[in-house]
Amino acid sequence: MSTGSDARLVLLRHAKSAWPDVADHERPLGPRGLRDAPAAGRWLRDAGCLPSLVICSTARRARETWALAAGELGAEVPVRFDERVYAAEPEDLLEVVSEVPEEVGTLLLVGHNPGLEDLAVTLAREALDPAEAGALERLSEKFPTSAIAVLACPGSWQELAPGSARLTDFAVPRGAAR
């Protein structure tokens, strides 16, 4: 991880999907998801959360979310599609994260609930200030589609464990309805 400051783990839940008669893994984004995914990318850019690496679920709705969000970043970001992120439990996601090279300072996971929400709540330690407490409370109430949780992570990716990170931001970017 980057020296002198905490690395960041950014969790992005896929945007709102449609429900056509297809297998769950192949569900595409719906109209709201097509609006919200670019808004998530703009939020990442404006918040200074440009990832060094993206690990994305192989599910169609997650891949489409990342493609639309990435288009708003203004930079090329390496992405790995990992089938383990689809329908993953927090322990599975921690295993994926533990394989990330040390030089990655900001890691973005694009995935699904309940895994992402459970991971964020599991990793976040008790809030140190009112802003962190508010973010943790909002996240604990609901981690909706297109939600983004940002966690500051001291130590190495391999050392990431329950209660070891600080939830520094939680946002739910939405695109304008047309």
Image (cartoon, grey):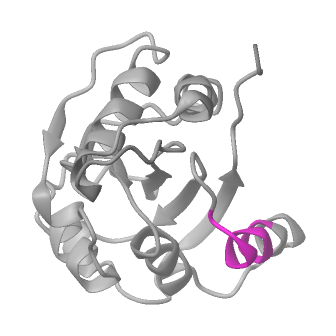
Query: Can you say whether 59 is above or below 88 in the image?
Result: above
Query: Can you say whether 155 is above or below 40 in the image?
Result: below
Residue at position x 70%, y 25% from top?
Answer: 175
Of 120 and 163, which appears nearest the observer? 120
Quarter of the rendering containing residue 23: bottom left
141 with respect to 165 (left or right)? right
Of 63 and 153, which appears nearest the observer? 63
74 with respect to 44 (left or right)? left
Quarter of the rendering containing residue 102: bottom left
In the image, which residues are magenta?
135-143
Position of the N terminus, as image quadrant, is bottom left
- Overall secondary structure of the magenta section: helix
Residue reaching furthest to the right:
130
Percent position of residue 143, x then y: 62, 65
Position of the C terminus, as image quadrant, is top right
Residue at position x 77%, y 21% from top?
Answer: 177
Residue 133 lies in magenta, yes or no?
Answer: no
Percent position of residue 74, x then y: 44, 10
Percent position of residue 34, x then y: 53, 25
Residue reaching furthest to the front:
21
15 with respect to 7 (left or right)? right
